[in-house]
Amino acid sequence: MNKPVLTMSRRSNHQGFTLVETVIAMGIITIMITAFMAAFGPAVKGIQKSISAKEANRLATTLEYELSILRFEEENSDGAEYTTAFEKAFEWIEESGTNDRDSYILLYQYRGDPDKVRDDGSLEPQADKSKQLPGSDYVLQSVVRRLGDDKVSEELQPGIVEGRVFFVRMTQLVFDNGELKLAGQDGVPGGLGQIIDPTEPRDTVTDHTDYPEATIAFQAQFYVLKSSVYSYVNGTFDLDDDNNDGHPDATGKPAFVRNMAVRR
């Protein structure tokens, strides 16, 4: 006769969390996340701001450098070669505020071929689509050019231009009652498209040789264009200001402004 086999059920030692324990755990996690965001949120924002500041500094430095040098056989608006970098800076500052399309100042980056250097020191665009290795096949070039420069049409092409294109407009700064003010505002003569004698009687100066001071102080406004391709920049973009806010309708307010100066 077989003996009955007695089986005993083994009670599991693993028990689930109770509702109260779950709620407590969720509360602790919420507190930890809140503390984390409070501690690292400002740091993240600071990093974002520093990147923005870095780009602004790069743009301003690129403009400042371009206004301080004279490139090989660089010509003025009349087709004659500049004699000095100061002459170039004087004309660029003055004409940047006019509606002359050829005088629009553009600042951008493009992919340059490191093996092909132009006479002016810049690189030919890297147009070979098979050469995509940065630092070897191409290097990014930051440049400031006027729209009338033939090189702009070569560089503002898809696959060559890199990132955004900025339009730069400059207005002279003068001292008035001990304060640095924009010409054309707050009763100060001058304004966009003009250079004046920064001292009384503040006569308009039309030639760099007649400018009496060694320095031209100015404010540069950097506007972001809606498109980076040449067809837009040369065809669609204009300086119309139908809402009379002092800025081109095509761009709105500038991304940033920077007070700068050029010397003889």
Image (cartoon, rainbow, N blue to C red):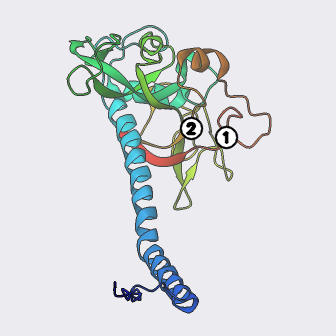
Q: Is residue 95 visible?
A: yes
Picture quarter containing residue 191? top right
Using the image as rendered, state which of residue 153 and residue 21 is in the foreground. Answer: 21
* Place of residue 48 in the rendered image (x, y in percent of width and height, measured from the top left): 44, 56
Q: Is residue 71 visible?
A: no
Using the image as rendered, state which of residue 95 and residue 45 is in the foreground. Answer: 45
Identify residue for label 1: 252
Q: Residue at x 36, y 17 (%)?
A: 82
Q: Residue at x 41, y 71 (%)?
A: 40
Amino acid on which the number 1 mark rests in the picture:
Gly
Amino acid on which the number 2 mark rests in the picture:
Tyr
Q: Residue furthest front?
A: 1
Q: Residue furthest bottom?
A: 20
Quarter placement of the C terminus: top left
On screen, residue 236 versus residue 84, left or right, reads right
On screen, residue 249 versus residue 62, left or right, reads right
Q: Which mark is residue 223?
A: 2
Using the image as rendered, state which of residue 123 and residue 30 is in the foreground. Answer: 30
Quarter placement of the N terminus: bottom left
Q: Are marks 1 and 2 in contact (CB under 8 Å)?
A: yes
Mark 2 crowd level (few <14, some 14–19, many ≥20, 10 Å Cα): many
Picture quarter containing residue 245? top right
Using the image as rendered, state which of residue 62 and residue 264 is in the foreground. Answer: 62
Mark 1 crowd level (few <14, some 14–19, many ≥20, 10 Å Cα): some
* Place of residue 211 in the rendered image (x, y in percent of width and height, measured from the top left): 45, 33
Examine the rendered structure and indicate whether residue 223 appears above or below residue 179.
above
Q: Which mark is residue 118?
A: none
Q: Residue at x 36, y 86 (%)?
A: 5
Q: Secondary structure at mark 1?
A: loop
Q: Residue at x 30, y 22 (%)?
A: 70
**CA distance for labels 1 and 2:** 8 Å
